[in-house]
Image (spheres, helix red, strand yellow):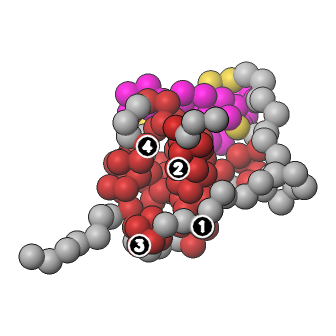
């Protein structure tokens, strides 16, 4: 019997698909990769409702611009989230929360440990290097945080 390795999207579904909160966490982490740094600073992922990802924008002009590029954004989200990616994007207007500090800023910790071999193997199927790196970083952080919550203190 041949042993097959799970596809990255299968891994994303197993890691993040167990609850809406986990799915939203994955999509929030994937958003800067899909949207790019400039657009990510001007938007905020606020909710996932069914197959619709709700993204907050500062004003009508940004909402109009995002509406024009929603197809490519969904495509990039699919590269990271696979089956967990939204089918649609919806935009609402409102104040954007302060963005979390970039990983390059002092005092921001990187992943607790290097990604596992299984995670690395699954990520190999993601063609875009930036998306692959983001997936690995997000999954590694999520798994490290989940392990620390289960550990007795």
* Magenta stretch in the rendered image: 44-67
- Locate residue 8, reporting x and y percent: 38, 62
Quick one: label 3 or label 4, which is nearer the N terminus?
4
Q: Nearer the viewer, mark 2 or mark 3?
A: 2
Question: As displayed, is residue 77 above or below residue 51?
Answer: below
Question: As displayed, is residue 46 above or below residue 72?
Answer: above
Q: Residue at x 62, y 62 (%)?
A: 113
Quick one: label 2 or label 3, which is nearer the N terminus?
3
- Do labels 3 and 4 touch, CB within 8 Å? no
Q: Nearer the viewer, mark 4 or mark 1?
A: 1
Which quarter of the image is occupied by the C terminus? top right
The CA span between labels 4 and 2 is 10 Å
- Pointer 2: what residue? 143
The CA span between labels 3 and 1 is 13 Å
- Pointer 3: what residue? 121
Q: Nearer the viewer, residue 22 or 61?
A: 22
The CA span between labels 3 and 4 is 17 Å
- Pointer 1: what residue? 114
Query: Dot 2, how many residues are within 10 Å of its Cα: few (below 14), some (14-19), or many (20+)?
Result: some
Quick one: label 4 or label 1, which is nearer the N terminus?
4
- Pointer 4: what residue? 16
Residue 63 picture quarter: top right
Quick one: label 3 or label 1, which is nearer the N terminus?
1
Q: Nearer the viewer, mark 3 or mark 1?
A: 1
Quick one: label 2 or label 1, which is nearer the N terminus?
1
Query: Given the current orientation, which residue lies at the most extreme front position?
Result: 153
The CA span between labels 2 and 1 is 11 Å
- Locate residue 139, reporting x and y percent: 53, 54
Query: Dot 3, how many residues are within 10 Å of its Cα: few (below 14), some (14-19), or many (20+)?
Result: some
- Locate residue 138, reporting x and y percent: 58, 53
């Amino acid at each position: 019997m041949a042993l097959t390795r799970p596809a990255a999207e299968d891994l994303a579904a197993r890691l993040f698909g167990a609850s809406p909160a986990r799915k939203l966490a994955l999509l929030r982490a994937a958003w800067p990769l899909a949207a790019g740094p400039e657009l990510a600073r001007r938007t905020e992922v606020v909710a996932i409702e069914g197959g619709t990802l709700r993204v907050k924008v500062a004003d009508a002009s940004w909402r109009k611009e995002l509406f024009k590029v929603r197809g490519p954004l969904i495509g990039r989200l699919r590269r990271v989230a696979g089956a967990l990616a939204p089918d649609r994007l919806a935009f609402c207007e409102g104040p954007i929360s302060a963005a979390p500090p970039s990983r390059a800023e002092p005092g921001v910790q990187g992943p607790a440990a290097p990604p596992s071999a299984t995670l690395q193997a699954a990520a190999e199927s993601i063609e875009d290097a930036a998306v692959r790196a983001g997936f690995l970083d997000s999954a590694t952080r999520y798994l490290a945080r989940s392990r620390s919550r289960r550990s007795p203190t």
